[in-house]
Amino acid sequence: MTVRIGLIGAGGMGRAHVERITNELAGAQIVAVADINLDAAKAVAEPLGAKAYADGKELIADPEVDAVLVATFGKVHEESVIPAIEAGKYVLCEKPLATTAAGCEQIMAAEQKVGKKLVTVGFMRRFDQAYREMKELLEAGDLGYATLVHNRHRNPSVPEGYVSRMAIDDTAIHEIDTMRWLLGEEIVEARVDRPRFTSKRFEHLNDPIVVVMKTESGVLIDDEVNVNIQFGYSIECELVMEAGTARLGDQERIHVRDGHGDRNKICNSHIDRFHAAFNQEVQEWIRAVAKDEHTGADSWDGYAAAVVVDAAVASLEDPEGKPVKVEMIDKPGLYA
Ligand code: ISE
């Protein structure tokens, strides 16, 4: 079966998904593209012989669309995700699932009504080979349990429209999800520390910051979010266990040693750094949809990330930066 996918949102992320589905992955085809800017939708759709829509809801209602890929701005995710659930179609929604916990709860309510998990949240690091090996190593238990995790999330620069809370709801949200998944437990508390800020930032931005989180069992997680580091896109993670540590390779590139030094090329964005992880994520989603199965992070994971984001943002906005407890509803049975 070829899964017929409708893409909502023809921006950079959406176009990167079209490229991988069309040229790199198996089992699916883009049959429709929607964007509030109809010309942008047409520019992506026409070379593929796909239909173009200005309204995502029309794309969702199209009987030739089997599954929906949502790559619009986080603030408008609910307006595509909920109608797709109501139409009984599988959805791969880029992170965040919604920008508020209430939005995520509405999405979970819609899924519970249908009685089926249809939503996958695009937390692609769960599909990264190195993170997967780290999780396997931890779960094998030979090195004991986790005590600490150190993370560094660095972007070369961000545009002026990037505001301080985005360091958490747009950037650190990846570590928030990855840490819950890696450790297999919830984050219960978050605090934001502010070091000396870089002169490379726009004046309105707190940058860098360090998000410090604690899990149910007491694992301490730190996450340096540093979004104007200039030199490139760099993700680091070190898991500390009782009798050993595991560290992620820094870049998805070869290592060269020659007369100029010992080095690897530096990626510039998440799209190249996590190229293989995105491919793996979308390929597993396509296979799962064809078998009428769910895969990847579910709506509960989207909700859990949103409530940790809320706690961290509250600490960021507190002049004393006090730790804030994460408030969570009970997990609905559908996500058990
Ligand atoms: C972007 O949306 C991402 O998802 C990237 O992984 C992250 O590094 C970046 O800060 C975000 O803006």
Image (cartoon, rainbow, N blue to C red):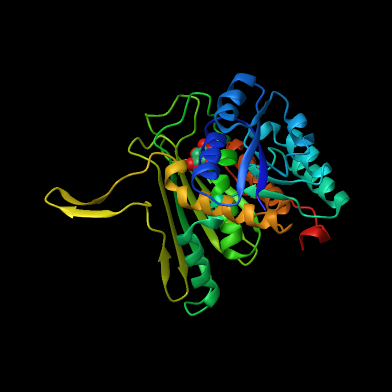
Above or below — where is 258 with respect to 203? Answer: below
| 22 on left or right of 121 | left
**In which quarter of the view is residue 288 placed?**
bottom right
Asked whether the viewer can see residue 153, the reply is yes
Judge by depth and name the residue closer to the eye, 203 or 83: 83
Asked whether the viewer can see residue 326, the reply is no
Instruction: Write the residue at 64% across / 42% down.
Output: 96
Q: Pinpoint residue 319: horizontal percent, then vertical percent.
A: 58, 36
Name, please, the residue furthest toward the bottom: 142
Judge by depth and name the residue closer to the eye, 104 or 201: 104
Above or below — where is 220 with respect to 228? Answer: below
Above or below — where is 161 with respect to 239? Answer: above
Quarter of the picture holding the C terminus:
bottom right
Name, please, the residue furthest toward the left: 259
Q: Pinpoint residue 70: horizontal percent, then vertical percent.
A: 66, 38
Judge by depth and name the residue closer to the eye, 151 or 107: 107
Above or below — where is 130 with respect to 49? Answer: below
Instruction: Write the residue at 61% across / 26% down.
Output: 41
Q: Pinpoint residue 329: horizontal percent, then vertical percent.
A: 79, 53
| 107 on left or right of 323 | right
Looking at the image, how many numbered discs can be counted on the residues? 0
| 325 on left or right of 214 | right
Q: Pinpoint residue 80: horizontal percent, then vertical percent.
A: 74, 35
